[in-house]
Image (cartoon, grey):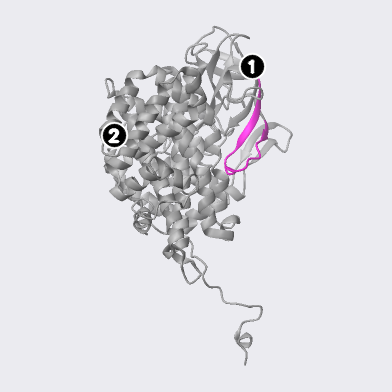
């Protein structure tokens, strides 16, 4: 009797050599770089919670939420059944479950809570990073809510009215006014207009005082926003002009006006985006929308930039999370998939690729965690100058570099999966589509690089303190010392040449920062491989393609450290 006769009807083959889903593991415990950084930046008290949450985030039912939230994108309902304008955005239940988890863990406000402990910023950023490995779109309103708190705290009367809902760890999806009993709120942002994009100083939206003018006063806004992030939020921070040629001011624009009716912010449409599909981004128009000026009149850009500084840190974390998620999926796949007579992970060339990806991921992790610590420590009066430099100068460089690297990284990790990585039934395609957004959002690459130069000019003393600190580590690593000298020379060049080289400067700054951190905190073989391949003699051999590490490094050990599951 033939083999076919033994098979059930319709079965032509046995399924073998396919990789099981990566679920049910502690994503915190199996990330040694993150575990060490949490302790280093003063958040060891939160490690047990991070481990518990990390295990929960990898359970099959939770992993499924990410796919569901992205397959069932938000939908705009402009009118109800009676024809009344409602501008409601409808989300799949998976989206709300993701937000419930994010808020329950305090990732929207932890460092600003009355009970916040030392190390809360690092604790929050580590938790955000773990969530980012599950799903990216739900991070957007959480980031903006988080970043709005330092701005709103400067407006005591307003903050007193909203702080209970802003800091709440509950998720309340109801589209009702806070005064009607809503338990929590989210904050969005509206900066860019059609004619300007990143050049917000070209904005033309006008704000007209409803009575007395100035900070804390009511205005009506007329104009538009081309990108209005998360339109379902309970309020947005918006830039508008109080005079045709005057400076921009910042306004708090609630979803509901003081009379309880929907504010006159009409959603024109939701953006049809490449990635980040679970999250709603929109175009809106203001038809005498109610708003309250926050910050001083004409100082809207500096006011909202304080918010942008925090959102840019989250862009770094979000990209690092995508890299980590893609890395562990690639390593898991290579450990289970066989080709040409051996598991992929046992083949020298594949180990080289995975080791190179692991170096990039660890470098991104230690960098964002160091920035998290610097954000907290630089708040203290009389804090170290170097901490301020990390926050003001290194953050935009990290935002430029890590977000750029995520694009190449996710593509390479997808290739490890082969054809299975290119289809939407697995996570790799979603990671790849998510990768570009953080390079674009909150300031594109050129904007970040020019911000590095401006920060260097404004924070000369802090910059010198930072470089002096780096030199103490670099002297033991000739390649790192040479790269640091090159960076200093570029920073001291004449202004036109320096601006033309702004991307080289930001890249070198980020790589030097990563090299210093790995030299201080990573195993020697990891630090040496990164410094040599990114800054040293091997740089010319490796180029831009992952998997070109010199053979002298122990690729297998680097991969084993990266993900021990």
Find disc 2 in the rendering and name its residue: 117
Q: Residue at x 40, y 37 (%)?
A: 511
How far is the residue under mark 2 from the one under mark 1? 43 Å
Image quadrant of residue 390? top left
Give the percent coordinates (x, y) of residue 65. 52, 52
Give the percent coordinates (x, y) of residue 331. 44, 58
Mark 2: few/some/many CA within 10 Å (<14, 14-19, 20+): some
Give the percent coordinates (x, y) of residue 82. 73, 35
Quadrant including the C terminus:
bottom left
Give the percent coordinates (x, y) of residue 474. 29, 35
Find disc 1 in the rendering and name its residue: 204
Mark 1: few/some/many CA within 10 Å (<14, 14-19, 20+): many
Q: In this view of the protein, which residue sits in the foreground, 111 or 493?
A: 493
State yes or no: discs 2 and 1 in contact (Cβ < 8 Å): no
Quadrant including the N terminus:
bottom right
Is residue 82 one of those drawn in magenta?
no
Under tag 1, what secondary structure? loop
Is residue 286 one of those drawn in magenta?
yes
Q: Residue at x 31, y 50 (%)?
A: 525
Q: What range is drawn magenta here?
A: 268-288
Image quadrant of residue 222? top right
Query: Among all residues in the image, which is located at the extreme top?
Result: 212
From this viewpoint, is residue 506 visible? Answer: yes
């Amino acid at each position: 009797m033939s083999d076919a006769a033994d098979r059930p009807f319709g079965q032509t083959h046995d399924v073998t050599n396919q990789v099981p889903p990566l679920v049910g593991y502690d994503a915190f415990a199996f990330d040694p770089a993150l575990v060490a950084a949490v302790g280093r930046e003063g958040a060891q008290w939160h490690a047990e919670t991070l481990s518990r949450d990390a295990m929960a985030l990898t359970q099959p039912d939770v992993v499924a939420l990410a796919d569901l939230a992205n397959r069932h994108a938000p939908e705009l309902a402009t009118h109800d059944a009676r024809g009344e304008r409602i501008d409601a955005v409808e989300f799949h239940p998976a989206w709300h479950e993701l937000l419930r988890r994010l808020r329950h863990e305090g990732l929207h406000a932890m460092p600003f809570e009355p009970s916040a402990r030392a190390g809360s910023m690092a604790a929050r950023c580590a938790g955000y990073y773990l969530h980012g490995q599950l799903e990216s779109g739900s991070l957007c309103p959480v980031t903006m809510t988080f970043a709005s708190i330092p701005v709103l705290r400067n407006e005591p009367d307003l903050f007193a009215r909203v702080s209970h809902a802003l800091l709440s760890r509950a998720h309340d999806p109801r589209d009702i006014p806070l005064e009607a009993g809503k338990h929590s709120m989210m904050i969005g942002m509206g900066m860019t207009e059609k004619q300007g994009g990143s050049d917000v100083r070209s904005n033309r939206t006008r704000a007209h005082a409803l009575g007395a003018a100035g900070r804390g006063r009511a205005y009506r806004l007329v104009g538009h926003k081309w990108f209005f992030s998360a339109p379902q939020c309970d309020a947005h921070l918006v830039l508008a002009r109080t005079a045709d040629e005057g400076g921009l001011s910042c306004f708090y624009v609630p979803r509901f006006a003081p009379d309880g009716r929907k504010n006159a912010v009409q959603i024109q449409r939701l953006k049809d985006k490449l990635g980040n599909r679970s999250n709603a981004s929109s175009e809106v128009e203001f038809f005498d929308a109610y708003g309250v000026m926050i910050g001083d009149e004409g100082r809207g850009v500096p006011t909202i930039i304080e918010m942008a500084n925090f959102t840019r840190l989250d862009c770094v974390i979000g990209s690092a999370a995508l890299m980590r998620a893609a890395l562990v999926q690639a390593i898991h796949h290579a450990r289970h998939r066989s080709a040409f007579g051996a598991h992929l992970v046992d083949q020298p060339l594949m180990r080289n690729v995975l080791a190179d990806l692991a170096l990039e991921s660890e470098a991104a992790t230690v960098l964002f965690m160091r920035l998290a610590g610097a954000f907290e420590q630089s708040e203290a009066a009389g804090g170290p100058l170097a901490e301020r430099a990390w926050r003001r100068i290194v953050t935009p460089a990290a935002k430029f570099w890590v977000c750029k690297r995520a694009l190449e990284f996710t593509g390479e990790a997808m290739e490890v999966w082969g054809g299975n990585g290119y289809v939407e039934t697995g996570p790799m395609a979603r990671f790849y589509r998510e990768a570009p957004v953080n390079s674009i959002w909150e300031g594109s690459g050129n904007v970040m690089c020019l911000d590095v130069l401006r920060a260097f000019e404004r924070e000369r003393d802090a910059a010198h303190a930072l470089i002096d600190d780096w030199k103490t580590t670099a002297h033991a690593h000739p390649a790192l010392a040479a790269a640091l000298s090159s960076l200093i020379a570029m920073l001291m060049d004449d202004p036109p040449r320096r601006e033309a080289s702004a991307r080289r400067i930001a890249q070198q700054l980020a790589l030097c920062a990563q090299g210093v951190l790995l030299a201080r905190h990573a195993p020697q073989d990891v630090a040496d491989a990164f410094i040599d391949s990114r800054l040293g003699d091997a740089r010319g051999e490796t180029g831009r393609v992952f998997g070109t590490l010199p053979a002298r490094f122990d690729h297998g050990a680097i991969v084993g450290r990266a993900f021990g599951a």
